[in-house]
Amino acid sequence: MNETQIDWSSLPFGYLKTDINVRCRFSNGQWGPIEETDSEFINLHMAATSLHYGQEAFEGLKAFRGKDGKIRIFRLEENARRIIESAKGLLMEPIPVELFCEMCKRAVLANERFIPPYGTGASLYIRPLEIGTSAQVGVKASADYLFLVFVTPVGPYFKEGFRPTKICITRKYDRVAPKGTGRFKVGGNYAASIKAGAEAHALGYSAVLFLDPKEKKYLDECGPANFFAIKDGKYITPASESILPSITNKTFMQIARDMGLEVEERHIPIEELETVSEAAACGTAAVASPISEIDDLDTGKKYIIAPDGQPGPITTELYNRLRAIQLGEAPDPHGWNTIL
Ligand SMILES: *Cc1c(COP(=O)(O)O)cnc(C)c1O
């Protein structure tokens, strides 16, 4: 595809082929050279551990064309550190931070023509992926790994504007186990959540708000996004060992403090939803998705968060401030952007 034919503002959050992806293999106890390829396929042994036992971890981050024309990758090193934790969680080979950063930068620069122009609301999504590649039928960690980074342009998440949606609570499924892999960004957690997500969508909800898997008393996270709420002017977000530490959430916590708000990371009992004035899901894809209503499917209780159907003022402010930093419209006092 020629980039002049791309309608940036109406791109979905999907996959569009770009020119180059970047790869590196770990074998014989060391990482090899970085390779660039135009192939969208990988040649993988059918007995690879990633295919059978789920040895795979990934990341998701974005590059933007700023107001000043420069390319910025948002929170690159933070993502590099997180995939190390995910790899360790599945006994996979940790990727050195420098290797991760170098490969992401190369993937972005090699596909520069796919970085959406400033002002379109679109961005270049970066997807790093590590998989176990050793052929092995016995259940144990792979000796060999492939780490690859591909990029794809994605459109603005809110095409019809920044509008709250409804989500639901269900006790029918757990995404993760209490001492399981919830805090790692791995495919297995997603496999376990796809059915719950599809059932929620069929009922008209945008996501499932999962509860803590042990006691089912506290809020955990919102499918592939973290959850936060505003209560008495404070930013509150669940502390739980079964949720993925969202970098967007971490960023919002800092922006909230910069705005003079108190931040509380703690258990949030379900009933506390009656007392919050705003709520949202947060993650790289949407940044913040405001929530209008949370329906508990098991009890029939409905928590109405935004009766007027409008996003709350604090959620809107947090969203606007974070976007402005990504796009180089506002200063970046915490050094979150890597400028290429
Ligand atoms: C990736 C992910 C998030 C969001 O994390 P960000 O770093 O903000 O993109 C939240 N929950 C889960 C389960 C995730 O996999």
Image: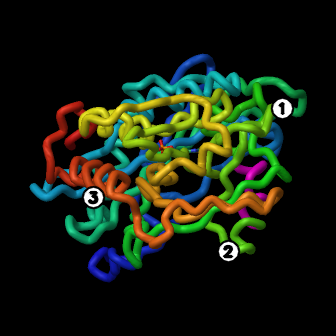
What is the spatial separation of the Cα atoms under label 2 and label 1, in whole angstroms? 43 Å
First of labels 2, 1 by sequence position: 1
Q: Amino acid at mark 2?
A: Gly
Badge 3: few (under 14), some or many (20 or more) residues near its Cα, within 10 Å? some
- Residues at marks 1 and 3, CA–CA distance in whole angstroms: 39 Å
Type of amino acid at the residue the image marks with label 3: Glu
Which numbered mark, 2 or 1, is in the foreground of this view? 2
Q: Position of residue 43 (x, y in %)?
A: 66, 49
Whether residue 197 appears in magenta in the rendering, the answer is yes
At 46% from the left edge and 56% from the top edge, which residue is drawn? 285
Q: Quadrant of the C terminus?
A: top left
Ligand 1 closer than 8 Å to the CB at disc 3? Answer: no
Query: Which scheme is used to colour this image of the protein?
Result: rainbow
Give the side of residue 330 with respect to residue 1, left or right.
Answer: left
Q: Which residue is mark 2?
A: 204
Q: Secondary structure at mark 1?
A: loop
Check disc 1 and report the residue beneath it.
136
Residue labelled with disc 3: 112
- As drawn, the residue found furthest toward the left would be 68
